[in-house]
Image (cartoon, helix red, strand yellow):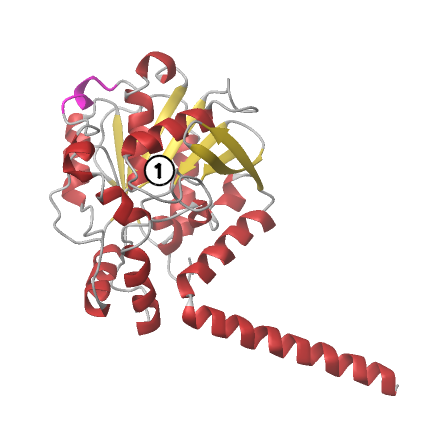
Amino acid sequence: MGLAIGILLLLVLAAITAVIVFSVVFFFRPIATTVWLRRNALRRAGLRKTQLTTTVGKQVVWHGGAGPVLVLLHGAGDQAGTWNRVAPELMRHFQLVIPDLAGHGESEPFAGVLSLGTLLTALEQVLDATPWRDAPLVVAGNSLGAWMAMLYVEKCAQKYRQRVTRVILIDGGPIKNSSEIGLMPKDREEARRTLDTVLDPSSPRRPNFVLDDLVRLSNTGPISRLLAAGEEDISKYLLEEELGNFQTPVDLVWGASDRLVPLDYAKKLQSQLPHCTFTVIERCGHAPQFERPRELTQVLLRILASNSPPDSVTAQSVSRQPGEDS
């Protein structure tokens, strides 16, 4: 009995020590810890991590599930783990392909200026990899990922226009955004204002140590490297003039409270795209995949249940039901 109690006490002590260590790490590196948790959630959901060789360096992609191929692309400064709360349900119906875009997450290059051309080249080669090389694709992206989804179809039109059966743009797109909100906060207060523009007012306020970590990463991570490419590089990849001839069906999914890429931006996209639907998620900001994952999953499943090209329709609204917790 004494030995059993001793072993139990050691296990309890080990658990307490682990909690303390995790708390300390989270306090000093909250964003890195959150990223680790989200990527670990992808693994627990059954997704496998693969490293692919491309002309711009090693690229990491998470994949799993069965059925039609659904590609999920994250936004600037983010990584594949952002989809961890929608992936488990989606992979019951689809084969998911979730890359870390070039220069993000665990994908190279890890240093230097990061152009949109580099991201597009890496994405093209990732989606040309086995086992999804010849499969029809639905490509969905959030923020910068939405832009990359459109570029993948439009800039590689000869090869991919028939392969991509649908594009889903989540709070992002390929036209100029007039928002002047900075993505590289210099101090805690600027970080607070930045978060206020991308989150719904009902979302919990982030503590100061998270804001400080955001300042550190924003000025050294992928966002700063993308901006270092300059306005001239970015302008080469805008599709202002091409949207009217875009024949691939497009579905817009937007957070009603997004002030970084606001609803007016989505309405402008809708007015220019010939085959387009528009869904608004209420009480949601710029990234529905972690503010309203349940609602986003329902919207995606509804969109993907339809095989017919959409006509341009008025925005639909999706609200959280009373008593539901996203």
Any part of residue 13 in sight: yes
Left or right: 191 as drawn, with respect to 209: left
> In the rendered image, which quarter contains the C terminus?
bottom left
**Is 294 included in the stretch rendered in magenta?**
no
Q: Which residue is drawn at 47% across and 36% down?
A: 59
| Residue lying farthest to the right in this orientation | 1
- In the displayed structure, 224 sits above or below 14; it is above
Q: Looking at the picture, tell me which residue is in the foreground, 229 or 204.
A: 229
Amino acid, disc 1: Gly
| Residue lying farthest to the bottom in this orientation | 2
Task: Say which residue label 1 marks.
Answer: 141
x%, y% of residue 212?
A: 30, 68
Q: Looking at the picture, tell me which residue is in the foreground, 298 or 36.
A: 36
Q: How packed is label 1: few (under 14 Cα within 10 Å), some, or many (20 or more)?
A: many
Any part of residue 95 in sight: no
- In the displayed structure, 140 sits above or below 283; it is above
**Magenta residues (range):** 241-246
| Residue lying farthest to the top in this orientation | 158
Q: Which residue is drawn at 28% across and 20% down?
A: 155
- In the displayed structure, 177 sits above or below 160; it is below
Left or right: 147 as drawn, with respect to 262: right
x%, y% of residue 246?
A: 24, 20
Left or right: 40 as drawn, with respect to 173: right
Q: Which residue is drawn at 29% across and 29% down?
A: 117
* Quarter of the image where one finds residue 225: top left
Q: Which residue is drawn at 25% across and 23% down?
A: 275
| Residue lying farthest to the front in this orientation | 112
x%, y% of residue 156?
A: 32, 18
x%, y% of residue 193?
A: 19, 63
Q: Looking at the picture, tell me which residue is in the foreground, 28 or 167.
A: 28
**Secondary structure under the numbered disc 1 in the rendered image:** strand
